[in-house]
Amino acid sequence: MSFTHRMATLAAVVAIPLGIAATSYALTDEPEAPRVPPAVELSSTPSGSSTPSGASTPTAGGTPSTSPPSDAVVPGPSATGDDDDDLRDEG
């Protein structure tokens, strides 16, 4: 009798997950194939010379501006540790 219980347990351990997987696979929808545009049109203006008509670039304030972004380098923070927002001095 013990062997029969072991076989039933083994069958349940294997059959239940397989049944769940088969049911899940049978109930899933087929995804649509991605649609690819027939042609890609490139702008004739050189990169960085001007923005396309009607396009605007956002500024730090959140309002759009019509000027293209510049290539200016922003300096990094000071390495001396003289920051005003340092929390170590409060106590």
Image (tube, grey):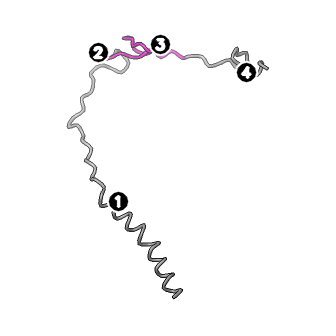
- The percent coordinates of residue 91 (x first, y second) are 79, 20
Identified at 60% across, 16% down, the residue is 75
Question: Which is more N-terminal, label 4 or label 1?
Answer: 1
Type of the residue with mark 2: Gly
Q: CA distance from mark 3 to mark 2?
A: 20 Å
Give the label on residue 87, or none. Answer: 4
Q: Tell me whether circle 1 and circle 2 mark residues in contact (CB < 8 Å).
A: no
- Which type of secondary structure does the marked residue at label 1 adopt? helix
Who's the residue at 24% across and 40% down the image? 36
Q: Which mark is residue 16?
A: none
For label 3, the residue is: 61
Task: Provide the major secondary structure of the magenta segment.
Answer: loop
Indicate whether 51 appears above or below 36: above
Q: Secondary structure at mark 4?
A: helix
Look at discs 1 and 4 and give the one toward the viewer: 1
Residue at the left extreme, as displayed: 38
Amino acid identity at mark 1 = Ser
